[in-house]
Amino acid sequence: MSTGTYQINDTDLTIQPTSGQWMGRDVLDLDGNGHPVYPTYYEFEMSWQLADMEQVKQLQDFFNLIGRTGTVSVNLPRYAYNPYIFRTYSGTVIHEPTYGSFFSERQSEVRLLISKIRIS
C-alpha cells in the first residue's frame, strides 16, 4: 500500500516533514574476500524545522503508545527507487522524537528516527 504521504500506522502526520532521509549504514566487518558487511536493516529520519504543539504531541503520542514495546508500519519514500514513490514498511521501530528550542510557541529542530526497516 502507498499513499504518497508520510504515515505511521495508516495515520497521516498532521504536518508532513520538512525533510526526510535514509541514513547511511556503518560497515560491521569485512567478509573473507574483503567486501564490506552491512547491517540487515536501514534507518530513516524525518525532520521538521518548526512544528506546532499539535504535531509534537502526535509524534510523542506515537512513541508513548507503541514506541517502547511494539512495532509500527510507516509510509516512507521508497529506498533508492525511481520514480519517487512511497511504500509501506511494516515491523519497524519508532524512536523517541528529539526537539530543539522553542520559537514563537513552536518547537524547532524536531527529529524522528525510524529503525529496523527491511528494504527487500
Image: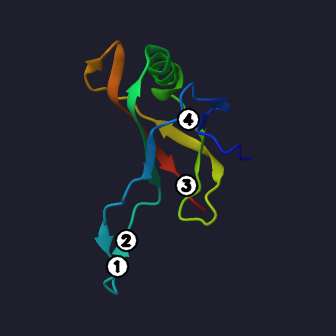
N-term-proximal mark, 2 vs 3: 2
Work out whether mark 4 precedes mark 3 in sequence or the reverse, and give the earlier one: 4
Q: Amino acid at mark 4?
A: Thr
Q: Which mark is residue 31?
A: 1
Residues tagged 1 and 2 counted as in contact (Cβ below 8 A): yes
Classed neighbour count for the residue bearing mark 3: other residues with Cα under 10 Å, few (<14), some (14–19), many (≥20): few
Q: Residue at x 49, y 15 (%)?
A: 54
Q: Which mark is residue 71?
A: 4
Location of residue 22 with respect to 48 vertically, above or below: below
Residue labelled with disc 2: 37
The image shows residue 44 at horizontal and vertical percentages of 45, 48
Q: Residue at x 64, y 63 (%)?
A: 83
> Helix, strand or loop at disc 4?
loop
Determine which residue is flagged by label 3: 118
- Kindly give the residue lying farthest to the front in the view shown: 104
Q: Is residue 80 left or right of residue 43?
A: right
Element under disc 1: loop
CA separation in Å, label 2 and label 3: 16 Å
- Tell me the CA gap for discs 4 and 2: 26 Å
Disc 4 vs disc 1: Cβ atoms closer than 8 Å? no
Does residue 59 lie above or below 77 as drawn? above
Q: Gap in Å between the C-alphas at discs 1 and 2?
A: 6 Å
Q: Are marks 1 and 3 in contact (CB under 8 Å)?
A: no
